[in-house]
Image (cartoon, helix red, strand yellow):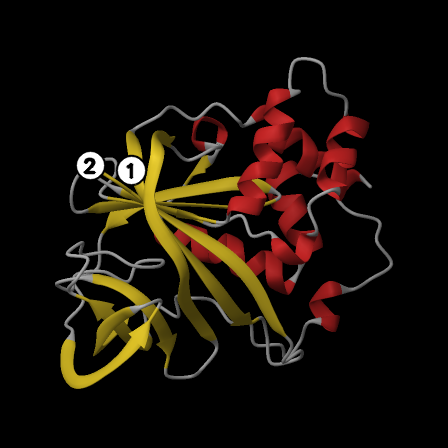
Amino acid sequence: MKKIICIMICIMAGLHGMAQDMAKFRIIYDGEGVVSNRSLTVKKISWNLDIGEHSTYFYNATNRAMLQEIRNLYAEASLLDAFSIADQYPAQSRHPLEVFCDYPQKGQYTYETEYLKPLIYTDALPDIQWQLADSTRQVCGYTCQQARGRVAGREWVVWFTADIPHSSGPWLLRGLPGLILEAEDTGRYFHFIAREMGDLEKPEPMYLISEDEAISCTREQYREYRDLNRKDPNAYVHLLYGIKESSPIDYAERNKGIEWNFLDLE
């Protein structure tokens, strides 16, 4: 219970992001991912890619809607209110990852996600050395060309369309002469495919929802936090809050041998 309360307090305290750009075009991707080698169940998540004048923002709309509803009640909400709201958004359809590209300045990206507390880091956008192929396919009604490239330790096969001349795509996949509509890593752990897209009737502000309260770290520190949380959540809670959990579960022992699948391997 302590751990859950800490999570909700952080969510309710950390919803003060400032708008950085206005989204004018949105792509919705169906995403699939295999979490670990222990469970080969495919987790299915819907992702939005919002494109503004200067930047792009990749996020899970369900998770953001939950946080926004909590934010709207923030002045009067209790923890019970927050729990009630969270119950309306199934955990299997939520993911806290948010990636803001060309922010805070061009050529950089800011990565925010949550492991009990929001974590945030900024780094240089990867320089992906794409290899173009002659293969084409239809995705979401557009003719797309194949390209292959390596990002953060994973090899990706993507399909992009020059009919939408915007050099972006899901996650950190970008840098081609057209929008990436489909992407899959060669290990077949992750797959994104565009389901729908179009101009927004009214531009919407783009911002990382917990930026003001997130723990700033380097990319290396973020990976250390993330890996510790997966291997031993009790140790992670102790690191962040100084709380020693009295859980009867020995997570470090239980999680031995599990290989977790993340978008980045290095």
State the separation of the CA atoms marked 2 and 1: 8 Å
Which residue is more in the foreground, 68 or 140? 140
Which residue is more in the foreground, 232 or 111? 111
Of discs 2 and 1, which sits in the foreground? 1
How many numbered marks appear? 2
Q: Is residue 211 above or below residue 32?
A: above
Q: SS of the residue at dot 2? A: loop
Q: Badge 1 is on which residue?
A: 24
Q: SS of the residue at dot 1? A: strand
The residue shown at (52%, 39%) is 118
Quick check: 195 left or right of 230? Answer: left
Q: Badge 2 is on which residue?
A: 53
Q: Quadrant of residue 44?
A: bottom right
The residue shown at (68%, 53%) is 91
> Percent position (x, y) of residue 76?
71, 14
Q: Are marks 2 and 1 in contact (CB under 8 Å)?
A: yes
Q: Quadrant of residue 230?
A: bottom right
Q: Amino acid at mark 2?
A: Glu
Q: Is residue 12 visible?
A: no
